[in-house]
Structures are given as C-alpha cells and as structure tokens.
Image: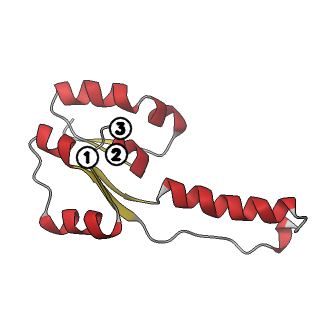
C-alpha cells in the first residue's frame, strides 16, 4: 500500500489516531475525506469544513423547530471545499507539499502544525 484514503465515517474518524500510528510506522500517508481527520494525523484534504457543515445544518434545524415544513426546503449543497494540510505529518513522512497547496491552505483553509 502506498497511500491510505480515509473516508468520511464516524468509525474511521474515531480510530484515526490509531490508523495514523500504524501507517506512520510503515511510512504510508493517510489522506482523509475531512478536515478534522487531518488534525488527527492525515496529511491533507480538500473537503467540506465540518464546522461550516454543522452551522448550515443548525440553521435548517432552527427553521424546523420554528415550524417550517421540511417539504418546502430547497436542497442545500456545500459546493466549495477547503484545503487543509498537516505540515508536521507531511514532514514526518518526507512529503514535500507544493507551494500552491500550502498557499491555498493558508489563505482559504487551515494548516495544522
């Protein structure tokens, strides 16, 4: 295995630190589907920001609590991902992240060190 993709899944997310401890020993990078899993040891992702997803869901839930019928809601999509990188993990695995990726993470996403 040259790389592990970790999908957006609560079981995988809860075991992320264990997964990373095993893959780090084999010098295999993990590229997860969500930003929070990068913080837990993934190398990088271009994904939906979990905080923003929760905020959007909260707004919709608030409307439901105020009595608005869900059948009248339009579908809501978050169409833009954010670049999130873990520079410590990349360095540990000997991965040189492109300057363009680092710039995008710094200006529009997040960098974990």
* Residue carrying label 2: 38
On the rendered structure, is 63 left or right of 109? Answer: right
Q: Residue furthest right?
A: 67
Q: Is residue 15 above or below residue 6?
A: above
CB within 8 Å, label 2 to label 3: yes
Q: Is residue 33 visible?
A: no
Residue at horizontal 56%, vertical 59%?
53
Q: Quadrant of the N terminus?
A: top left
Q: Label 3, secondary structure: give it.
A: loop
Asked if marks 1 and 3 touch (Cβ < 8 Å), the reply is: no
Residue 12 image position (x, y, % from top left)? 46, 34
Between 3 and 32, the residue placed more toward the observer is: 32
The residue at 66%/59% (across/down) is: 57
Q: Is residue 58 left or right of residue 3?
A: right
Mark 2 secondary-structure assignment: helix
Q: Residues within 10 Å of mark 1 (few under 14, many from 20)?
A: many
What colouring style does the render use? secondary structure
Q: Which mark is residue 43?
A: 1
């Amino acid at each position: 295995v040259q790389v592990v993709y970790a999908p957006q899944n609560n079981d995988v997310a809860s075991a992320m630190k264990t997964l990373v401890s095993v893959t780090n020993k084999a010098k295999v990078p993990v590229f997860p589907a969500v930003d929070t899993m990068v913080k837990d040891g993934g190398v990088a992702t271009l994904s939906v920001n979990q905080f923003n997803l929760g905020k959007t869901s909260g707004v919709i839930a608030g409307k439901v609590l105020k009595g608005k019928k869900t059948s009248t809601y339009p579908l809501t999509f978050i169409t833009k991902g954010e670049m999130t990188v873990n520079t410590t993990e990349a360095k540990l695995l000997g991965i040189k992240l492109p300057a363009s990726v680092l710039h995008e993470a710094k200006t529009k996403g997040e960098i974990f060190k």
